Amino acid sequence: MSQAQAHPLATGQPIPWFTAPTAANPNYQFGTVAGRWVVLAFAGSTGHPVVGATMDRVFAHAHRFDGEKIAFFGVTVDPLDDERQPDKLPGIRWFRDADAKLSRSFGAMPPGSTTEYRAAMLLLDPTLRIYATFPVTPDGADQLLALIDQLPAPADHAGVELTAPVLVVPRVLAPDQCRALIDHYRAVGGTPSGFMREIDGRTVGLYDDGTKRRSDCEIQTDELRAVLRDGVVRCLVPEIAKAFQFHTTRIERYIVACYDGSDKGFFRPHRDNTTRGTAHRRFAVTINLNTGEYDGGGLRFPEFGNRVYVAPLGGAVVFSCSLLHEALPVTRGLRYATLPFLYDDAAAKIREQNLAYVDPGKPPAAAEPGAVAKISIGRAAPPA
């Protein structure tokens, strides 16, 4: 296979998110790695003498790729690299691109060609935008390593403090309403909450306590659902319209969630709309029901630094479902919250079209009653 250098990409250009296989994960979601510096190297084959020498030069400094400040992701179309280039966790992984689908999507392998590969190393900033590009040559490796030595901490990459584009809205629910929802959870009991992944074109529910530790219960009474719906309509719909010029017409999911400090309840960085079954979601809402009664558990948006967002008792944090976010571990006590998603009529059509792609083993619940206070009630969602 011949190795040519890839066409230069513009500095500041965001790269598209993608899902591709690694040795350990057949559906690795690259969009979740934001929040650190990232080297994305389209290598093609490290059996090529120049590419192999370049990777040897880079990995002579493998300790720099700690997975926290900076991570390395290589792309290979050569099955022999499975042996030559094993992953070295936590900071070095390879996408196994045997069908060249990923390489072609980035222009590293021209359409129709099976012998030419346009190699390049991209240095991405913590928002996954191109910071610099380097040739896949030993000199290019030296240039990359020299720049890595100068990089600031990920949270300081912009040179100014960044603020995530989120709303913090107080007094969505009254304290007695919050307590009623907590009492409902305690009476009904929670069950482990999963998350959604796209696997072979279908939206599948998974459970992994290394990714998420949370228990949920469905809000089962019309009275308590009306309490939540009324708070959303009165307090959040106008604020979302003002801040984001988005007119909410639908609400999805009536649950009370509990993160338990005894097992350090958390949810690792994720986005809420990356599968066909969740693509309709526009805004995520976290309404805290007992702020001050636990430690930890705040929301962090890794693309925008280390600031932690916490809503006051009965207040909400509202943010786009496209933002990478994580629920930090609860270190003491029990954290209760209610977590609806909001969308509009146009997104409802997307949802209906995509229901056919949701894993039949975890179907959405039956349709609920129709429009109330200008918000139509969507179907209960798969776990997410």
Image (cartoon, rainbow, N blue to C red):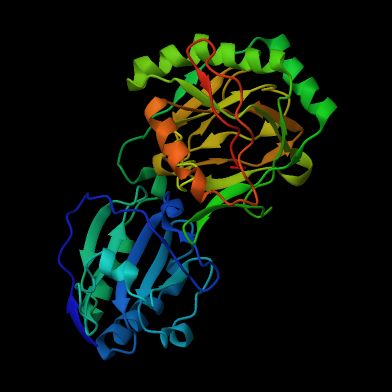
Which residue occupies 51% across, 12% down?
A: 233
Determine the residue positioned at 32% across, 74% down. 100
Q: Position of residue 264 (x, y in %)?
A: 71, 44
In this rendering, is residue 341 above or below 304? Answer: above
Return the residue nearer the eye: 237 or 73.
Answer: 237
Q: Nearer the viewer, residue 254 or 288?
A: 254
| Rendered-image quadrant of the C terminus | top right
Which quadrant of the figure has residue 30?
A: bottom left
Above or below: residue 224 compared with residue 217: above
Q: Is residue 34 left or right of residue 11?
A: right
Q: Quadrant of the N terminus?
A: bottom left
Task: Give the residue displayed 40% in from the left and 75% down from the top.
Answer: 61
Q: Quadrant of residue 316?
A: top right
Q: Residue 337's quadrant in the figure? A: top right
Report the side of 359 relative to 345 (left or right). right
Find residue 66 and report its horizontal and vertical position in percent.
Answer: 48, 64
Compared with 361, 243 (above or below) is: above
Q: Position of residue 332 (x, y in %)?
A: 75, 36
Whether residue 300 is visible here, answered yes or no, is: yes
Is any part of residue 170 visible from this angle? no
